[in-house]
Every structure is written in C-alpha cells, then in structure tokens.
Image: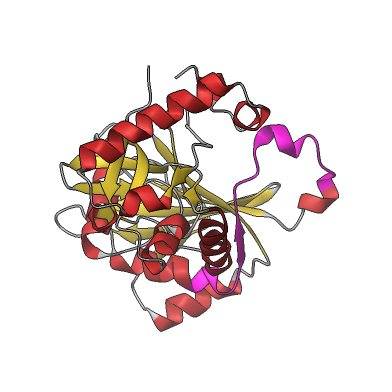
Amino acid sequence: MKPNLRIVKLADIVPLMEYESAKVDYLISSFEQTGTIRNPFALASVSKSRYLMLENSSPLEAARRIKIEHIPAQVIPFKKALKFTADLAASDVLLADLKRFSDMFPRSFYAAEKTCEDKNDRRWTVVRISKKNVTELDICFPRNSSGRISPELFTFLRFLGKRWSYSGAVQPARIKAVNVKAQTDRWLMRVINLEADDLLYAADRGFLFPRGLLKFNYGHRLIGIDYPIDILKEPVPLNHKEQFLHDLVNMRLNSGFYDYIKSGVYLLNY
C-alpha cells in the first residue's frame, strides 16, 4: 500500500510529545543549510484540518521557528484502534523521588509494591516502574468520573524527567547484545491503560508526554525526499505543492542514486 502523502498546514498540527532543544537547533541548521525538509512528518488525521504529530515535536518546533507554513507529511487516519506503546528506559533512578512528588501533591496517586491485578482497569492510569530482579512498582493515577486521564500524570512525568535520565526503551534483541553490567542502572517506565482517546484528550488540553514515550505503528515510513522549502513558501495552490511531492518521490525512486536507496525510499516500492 502506498504511503498517504500530503502537504499539511503547520498550524493544523498538534504535538503529543515534548521537543528536544538540541534537536530543534540541529534541525533549524539543517533546514537553513540544505534548503529542504528531508523527511515527511508522521501525522494522524483527526479531521480535515487537524492532525496529531506521531513523533517527537522537534521537527514541528523547528519549522515554526523558521516560519514555514506548510510541510510534507505522511498521514494515517486517527482511529480508536490506533496501535502504540508508551514506554521509556530511565537511568539515575531514585525511588525517593516518588515520595517527594507524593509529598508535593498529596492524594495525586496511589503507589503499590505489587502490580495491579487488572492492568486493563479503566479507573486508573498506571505508571509501571520496573527493573530486572527488582519488584515492579505501580503508580496509579485515578481517572475522573468521565474516565479522563489525570493532569497530575503529566506533572509527574515532567517531575521525574528533571531528575531521571529518559531514553528510548531498550529492545529485547539489543539486551542480548550488550554487557549485562552496563544495564544494571536502567529501569523501564511504562504507562499502562492509555488508549487513542486519551491521546486526543491530552492534545485538546495541551498536555505533552515526554519525548520518545509514545511509539506508533504507522506502517512503512517514507524518508529521504528532500522537499525544497522554497516551493513550500511559493504562493501557489496547495494541490500543486502536493502533486510536486508525489512527482518528487517518484523521481527519487527512479533516479537509482545511492543516497536515495540508502535512505530507504527505494525499498518501499512507492
């Protein structure tokens, strides 16, 4: 199936995750030096004029700062069955930080040394902190009477993010390839009971998850198109810019140049 490629108005995109300042600076430099946007943004279409960003919002923030009004995007439809995971690896973990947060925000959550009996209980949003050979700890944030996630969840994740070092979750295949001792200080933090409606609720209220927490299954990713920023800024109809996007991708695929094959565009058989 061909990727759904569009030219999308930047103002119609809502971020789900925080951006990384260093990454934003790098992308701004890249945009200005190359004059192109290399990879289409990964978006989910909520309506005709509203999209959710399915990756860290660093590219979105960089485009805003250099005043780009439209961007190339690979779009999937937003569905309640949207598949995603919510986990991060964390180091520099001090469990005493959980007590500090509880003291600052009494009754914001309930901690249990034993894992929740039913992880699908929609009364809670559960942050599960675990480490190999260490008891799992569940931090349970009660939902409101309408089943909405608690704002304190985001305060909690930001609080820990300033004290712990977040990184992408370690994949099982990689765990086997590294020295076990090098992984002894790494914990896995997973947010359980999140559904697509929760993401929409968070986006509506401007709540942002930590960068890298959400990982979406949106099929094959198209990369390496190098769409010229000058064309995005030209005062021509949007459908012309969109047609140019499709023509550009086909040109990349038919060129046979190593750079485009290496980047993965050719392998998608667009």
Q: Is residue 161 magenta?
A: yes
The residue positioned 55% from the left and 67% from the top of the image is 25
Of residues 203 and 100, which is closer to you in this image?
203
The quadrant of the image that shows the N terminus is top left
Q: Pick whichever, 67 or 181, lies toward us.
A: 67
Percent x, y for residue 187?
Answer: 64, 54
Provide residue 86's location: percent of width, then percent of height: 45, 46
Image point (25%, 37%), residue name = 240
Q: Is residue 24 left or right of residue 47?
A: right
Residues drawn in magenta: 159-180
Q: Position of residue 235 (x, y in %)?
A: 23, 52
Front residue of 215 and 225: 225
Report whether residue 143 is seen.
no
Taking the view exactly as shown, the residue that stands out farthest to the bottom is: 104
The answer to whether residue 66 is seen in the rendering is yes
Q: Quadrant of residue 22?
A: bottom right
> In the image, is 237 to the left or to the right of 18?
left
